[in-house]
Amino acid sequence: MQTAPAVFLLGERIMDLYERLRSGYYDDVGPMPAKPSKKDLAVFASGKHEKALKEYKDKFNQYKVRKAMLHEQFVNDLAVYHGLDASHAKTRKAFDIAWEHGHAYGYHEVASYFAELVPLLED
């Protein structure tokens, strides 16, 4: 039995998984923070480097959390799109296999590999 694809709200607009992929939704992490350099001896000697380093670590942690949240959302959206339970161990294993084969080429490729594995997960 074929089910209708899941759709997701993005503000006022409804998007399906592939529209989100095309729009770069899952890549919208923002720029990676730049690590402060020790080369500027005046800044380093004044003690401002420690403050800048702490700010960098805070921003980098926020970046990693955002990236992890978007990744997990991609996993969940992909499972929902195919009518699967994202928390099921076999769904997660299928995603891990798809990720290993496709992540170097982007989320579209991961979604394609996952779609090929879905028939193995259906009842």
Image: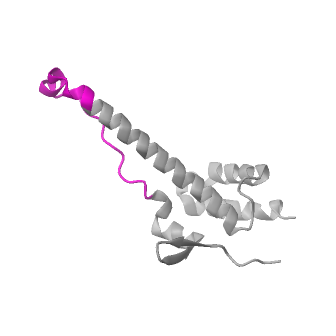
Q: Is residue 121 left or right of residue 59?
A: right
In the displayed image of the protein, which residue is found farthest to the top? 45
Rendered location of residue 68, percent (x, y)? 53, 48
Rendered location of residue 51, percent (x, y)? 25, 30
Residue 27 belongs to magenta span: no
Residue 54, relative to residue 120: is it above or below?
above
Residue 27, relative to residue 5: is it above or below?
above
Rendered location of residue 79, percent (x, y)? 69, 62
Image quadrant where residue 114 sits? bottom right
Which segment did they paint magenta?
A: 28-51
Q: Quadrant of the N terminus?
A: bottom right
Residue at the image position 42 percent from the left and 46 percent from the top: 63
Residue at the image position 64 percent from the left and 48 percent from the top: 100
Q: Quadrant of the C terminus?
A: bottom right
Total labels drawn = 0
Most foreground residue, 101 or 36: 36
Q: Is residue 99 left or right of residue 91?
A: left
Image quadrant where residue 77 sits? bottom right
Residue 13, relative to residue 17: is it above or below?
below
Residue at the image position 58 percent from the left and 57 percent from the top: 73
In the displayed image of the protein, which residue is found farthest to the left? 42
Q: How is the image coloured?
A: one colour
In the displayed image of the protein, which residue is found farthest to the right? 123
Residue at the image position 46 percent from the left and 72 percent from the top: 11
